[in-house]
Structures are given as C-alpha cells and as structure tokens.
Image: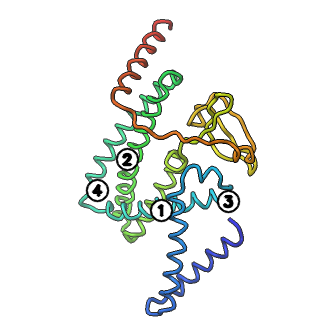
Amino acid sequence: MSGNEIETFQKISDFIDSFDSTSLGSIIILAILVCVVLVSVFKSIYSTSVEELFMNSKEKNKNMFFQLLVILTILIFINFMLLNVVLIFMEILLGTVSLVVYIVYQRKENGTRKYLEMIDELNTYYKQRSSFWYLISIICLIPSLVFLINSIENSIPLFNCAVITSVIEVSIICIIMPEYIMYDARNYFVDNENKFFIYGRIEDDIVLCGDNTQKSKASKYITISYEDLQKKEIFHMRRERLSKKRKRELRTIYKENKQVNKYYQ
C-alpha cells in the first residue's frame, strides 16, 4: 500500500471519529465520500475480463480490493440474519448436507483428473459443483460455530459477530477457493492456428499465456510482451452451461476409459 493510500485511509478514519450527524458539513462530506467509494466499487464489479487484462498490478490490486469489500459487505448482511437461535439448527443441518455433497463432487473431480484430455469439461463441472457446495457449507457452518461460541461467552455484540464471521469466510474463500476471486482465462489470441489463453501479467511488460482456460491444466505456456499483446486481435470464449446430454456423453467416456485402465492394471 502506497503512502498516498495510507494517508487517505487515515483521513477517512479521522473523519469517522469526528463525524457529527447534526452537522450539515459532515453530511455533505459523507455524501461525497460515499460517491467516491461507489465509483470505485462499480468500476470493480462491472469491469470486464478484457479490461482487467490491461490493468497494471496497482490497478488490479485496487480492483480486487473493492471486489472483496463488496463480498465482505454482502456476507456481513447475510451473517447478521443467520446469527439467529431460531435458524441455527437449520443452518447446521444444511451445512452438514452441503459438506457431504461437496465431498461427493470432490471425489468425482479427483477421479476424472486422470482423463483430462478426454473429459476436461466434466472435470471442470465437478470442480464448480464441489466449490459451490463447499461455499454453502461455509456460509452455514461458520455462523453456527461463531454463534455457539458466543452463546457460551455472551460477550460480543451480534453485529460484531457478523463482521468476525464474514472476515473468516472471506479469508477461507481467498485461500481455499480462489476461483471465486480469480476466474478462469476466457480471453485468447490465435498464433499459427494455436489458441493461447491470456492469464495476466507476471511483470509490468510480460504477459503469461497458455493452451487451457485454467492455468493449472495447461500443457504449454508462453510469454509475450505487453506491447505485442496490445497489437493482437483478442477473442472471448463465452461461458456455456454443460448440457445434460453432454454430461451423459462425458460420463460414458469416463466409465469406458476407467474400465480399460482397470483391465490393463
């Protein structure tokens, strides 16, 4: 964080400490401050993947900060509603069921990793489903755990519990589920009939690319200069939901290859 940003946060902190709801000046400053923050928030939420490609590291970090801020704000509201003695048992039940479903999809994802070249779409689908159910289990179980601990101590206000819970959840999402913050590459260029997906800058003037939408699944990587990237024609691959028919086809391929693999073992 730069010195200017630290100074800005310090000024905001000083303003909050001295804020007077009866003063017209304070209200006007608050309105201006909210507008400034909202501009950055809207730019972060609605920035396209192509726009993010051409951001420098400082702009990208700022973008990610406001995205996390939005997620944190939404989770605080959700957790404040969930930290309720009436809902706590339902949350534990739903969280437990979600965790079981997550384990099922996680096992399916692990089982299909050996055959990525043939059923990469199915593996990606299982990964998305396992991530979704893991997220649901976190949203249900973490508030329940915090509520039960606080009910024993009974020393933390409910809203503070919601904030603490949300910070824990955002930390888990960033560390264990980065796909909710850093999406798969969907922008690509074509070089000698080869499709290369653009992952992002590794230095200010160097961009990393690969032959798969997911960096970890790529079998080939290349680096190009940022200047060369600006001159290339960039295409965008739309996200399409995997149809039931296609899932059945991929499952059939998976089962056949699994049987062949068992036979030769």
Q: Which marked residue is nearer to the observer: mark 3 or mark 4?
A: 3
Write down the residue under mark 1: 70
Question: Residue 253 in the image: x percent, y percent?
Answer: 42, 18
Q: CA distance from mark 4 to mark 2?
A: 13 Å
Write down the residue under mark 2: 137
Q: CA distance from mark 3 to mark 1?
A: 19 Å
Q: CA distance from mark 3 to mark 2?
A: 33 Å
> In the rendering, which numbered label is found on residue 58?
3
Residue at 50% x, 64% y: name it. Answer: 42
Q: CA distance from mark 4 to mark 1?
A: 25 Å
Residue at 44% x, 41% y: name it. Answer: 131
Q: Which marked residue is nearer to the observer: mark 1 or mark 2?
A: 1
Q: Which marked residue is nearer to the observer: mark 4 or mark 1?
A: 1
Q: Is residue 183 above or below residue 46?
A: above
The amino acid on which the numbered mark 1 sits, given as a three-letter code, is Val
Question: Residue 194 in the image: x percent, y percent?
Answer: 64, 29
Q: Classify mark 2: helix, strand or loop.
A: helix
Q: Nearer the N terminus, badge 4 or badge 1?
A: 1
Write down the residue under mark 4: 88
Q: Is residue 61 above or below residue 226?
A: below
Tell which residue pokes out farthest to the bottom in this image.
23
Q: Nearer the N terminus, badge 4 or badge 2?
A: 4
- In this rendering, position of residue 148 left or right of residue 86: right
Q: Classify mark 1: helix, strand or loop.
A: helix
